[in-house]
Image (tube, rainbow, N blue to C red):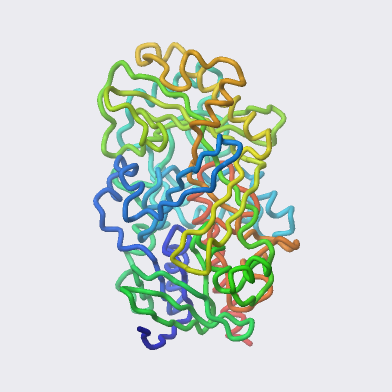
Amino acid sequence: MSSGEVTHDYIVVGAGSAGCAMAHRLTDAGEDVLLLEAGQPDEKDEIHIPAMFPHLMKSEVDWDYTTTPQEEMNGRELYWPRGKTLGGSSSINAMIYIRGVPHDYDTWAERGNEGWSYDDMLPYFKKAEHFEPGESELHGQGGPLNVAGAADPHPVSEAMVDAAAEYGIPRNDDFNGEQQEGTELYHVTQEDGKRCSAAKAYITPILDRGNLTVETGAQVTDIRFDGDQAVGVTYEQDGTEHHADADAEVIVSGGAVNSPQLLMLSGVGPADHLQDHGIDVVADLPGVGKNLQDHLFGFVVYERTKGGEPAPSTNIGEAGGFTYADESAPAPDLQFHFAPMYFMEHGFANPEEGQGFSIGATQLRPESRGHIELASDDPFDHPVIKPNYFSEQKDLDTIVEGVKQAREIAQQDALDDWRGEEVWPGEDVQTDAEIEEHVRETGHTVYHPVGTCKMGNDDMAVVDDELKVHGVEGLRVVDASVMPTISSGNTNAPTIAVAEKAAELITQDRAITADD
């Protein structure tokens, strides 16, 4: 079945972190926006109770992706949760608010992306933010996204911070401040102890706007073109095929997995790959799906000898720190997440009895690159995800160093009253080679895929520095997939800032067009 066509100024595909911000800001500017989300409304109680986020994994609000077997991780197929509901992954993530470091954005600009340096990006971080501790030169108030301190941290999280300080990582009460290096409780996207997702921040308050239409359970299957001009989309909802037209632009905000998949299904991507699947080529862009980057965890886990369950407001990764594996690096290259509980294989492998605490070590700027491919021309088939983890030896070496540092943190005096037996890697794992094997066998994603529709002007770039897709008209990509290189930390805040900047670019374009 097929419904009639409806016309809007802009169609935003995907109501995740970027899509929600885009829809809000474009309707602020008076544009008529259709926001399409493949998942259902964010009504599950577990979405809004921070401690429940592991229970959202492999649920109906998760795309539940799996990678191909990873050669350097003992052939394991790794689970990749991605949000499939209003708010996207911001509705199922651990709510940690980290921007990254100036070096990240200055690198983007140095690669020819004008307007994307740290100084350029700071106003958009501030615009998005309501920073509860207070406005400053580096923080904003009055923005949609509520950023708060931990509401009720577990005392073992504070003990881990003390232990990291004893180990030699300086204290730092704001990882998004003057410097990133340090250890402390994380700032989180919460309000009154509940999750503040992109949907809660940007969409829930404006659902009654006459110029915003939100459709859930609406999976876009195709971007429609007239020649090289994107003119609308086809989507399926409740078994019915719908067509919607865009007078101005189609904006793809599906994330690092779904955005390249949709572009390729629509004829925008590597010509030979599209032809292999019988897809007519609209634009031969070999970089679509390439340049995939992600962060990995290597964990140290201990039995906990005292203390009860964390509070419902816990984001589990309550505290952490940033430091160096390589002292010559331009900014911290290691991040730690401190969890006041067992967190083994996303929580699926946690012991059934007792309590624990966990320290996850993450390399911040991995050098390995993977890619996304189509499995078929069926938009309901999951794409093929090939991260190629540890294809660069330095990535593995850095995480091994991180695990060694995490162990040293755990042995500090501040944790003596909390620390029981080491569960992971275990006392029998001591040499670098043994730790390396532990990481290969137990490491998993930190849930930060980016880069698969990268911004730039080289042969592998997919969008320009205004996020317009090369080789076509009326089409942009706005989400984490446009990042040329991964940001140094959790990727939700940078994704929202990318959308804030993109919305301003679009409204400026619209004003210029109107003047003409």
* 455 vs 288, nearest the viewer: 288
Residue 195 higher or lower than 289, as above or below: above
Query: Which corner quadrant of the image does residue 348 belong to?
Result: top left
Q: Position of residue 91 (x, y in %)?
A: 37, 52
Q: Is 51 placed left or right of 174 in the picture?
A: left
Residue 134, visible in the rendered structure: yes
Residue at figure coordinates x 39%, y 11% from the top left:
416
Residue at figure coordinates x 31%, y 73% from the top left:
238
Q: Position of residue 159 (x, y in %)?
A: 39, 21
Residue 99 higher or lower than 270, as above or below: above
Q: Quadrant of the C terminus?
A: bottom right
Query: Which corner quadrant of the image does residue 28 belong to?
Result: bottom left
Residue at figure coordinates x 50%, y 19% from the top left:
409
The total of numbered circles placed on residues is: 0
Q: Quadrant of the N terminus?
A: bottom left
Residue 16 higher or lower than 303, as above or below: below
Query: Which corner quadrant of the image does residue 303 belong to?
Result: top left
* 171 vs 318, nearest the viewer: 318
Residue 321, visible in the rendered structure: no
Q: Position of residue 277 (x, y in %)?
A: 58, 69
Q: Position of residue 113 (x, y in %)?
A: 70, 59
Residue at figure coordinates x 59%, y 35% from the top left:
363
